[in-house]
Amino acid sequence: MAEDGLQSTHSSKDSDSIGTFSILTKVVEVVLSIFAIGLIVDPFNSFNRTHLDRRAPKLDDVVFIYITLGSYLIINTVFIISHAVLGDQIPKRLSVIFSTVGALFHIIAASLMVHNWRKLQGSGGIQYNNEVYGSKQYLDMLISGAVFTFLTFATFVVDIVLTFRY
């Protein structure tokens, strides 16, 4: 009798924590964030140094993008390490809260990247015929970073769905 009560409380504790699918989505989120950060570092550094006009990216945008990508890279890495190495169970509510805020922040960060990419078209870097043009390589890297950030947003949404489902 006492064992039956113990088993039922143990299984309810497991159902209140996230599963393997959610941890796998967190691994995907970390990888995509690493790619996004790697792609946007050089463009933002270059555009801030070489702009001759006022179409440079706003520092507020750049800071929000870096803080979003970097902080969720750290948060998800801590979740993965605590689950895989330490064997801790992450509560579903906590996971859903972090994933929801992460999805919101990543869609805003990706939108800011696209906004800055559009703003930087035809500006910064190369001067030709009295016009200043952005480096095509850096513009391509910036929009690729935005694509990876949109993919990270989609992975956060999948994480929320999997957390509710399993």
Image: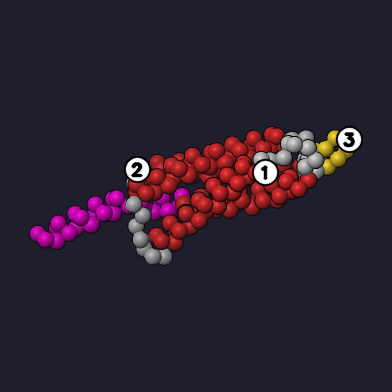
Q: Does the CB distance between marks 1 and 2 fall below 8 Å?
A: no
Question: What residue do we see at 85% from left, 35% from top?
Answer: 131
The residue carrying pointer 2 sits among few (fewer than 14), some (14 to 19) or many (20 or more) residues within 10 Å by Cα, namely: few
Q: Does the CB distance between marks 3 and 1 fall below 8 Å?
A: no
Say which of 45 and 37 sits in front: 45
Say which of 101 and 138 sits in front: 101
Let me know if residue 11 appears in the view: yes
As for residue 21 lying within the magenta part, the answer is: yes
Instruction: Write down the region rendered in magenta.
Output: 1-25
Question: What residue do we see at 34% from left, 52% from top?
Answer: 91
Element at badge 3? loop
Labelled disc at residue 142: 1
- In the picture of the structure, the residue carrying the numbered disc 3 is 130
What's the coloring here? secondary structure
**Amino acid type at image mark 1:** Leu
Question: What residue do we see at 17% from left, 59% from top?
Answer: 6
**Amino acid type at image mark 3:** Asn
**Amino acid type at image mark 2:** Arg
Point out the image quarter for the N terminus. Answer: bottom left
x then y, percent, for residue 109: 57, 41
Q: Furthest-bottom residue in view?
A: 85
Badge 3 or badge 1: first in the primary sequence:
3
Say left or right for 53 vs 13. right
x then y, percent, for residue 135: 78, 43
Let me know if residue 159 appears in the view: no
Separation (CA) of disc 2 from disc 3:
58 Å
- In the picture of the structure, the residue carrying the numbered disc 2 is 165
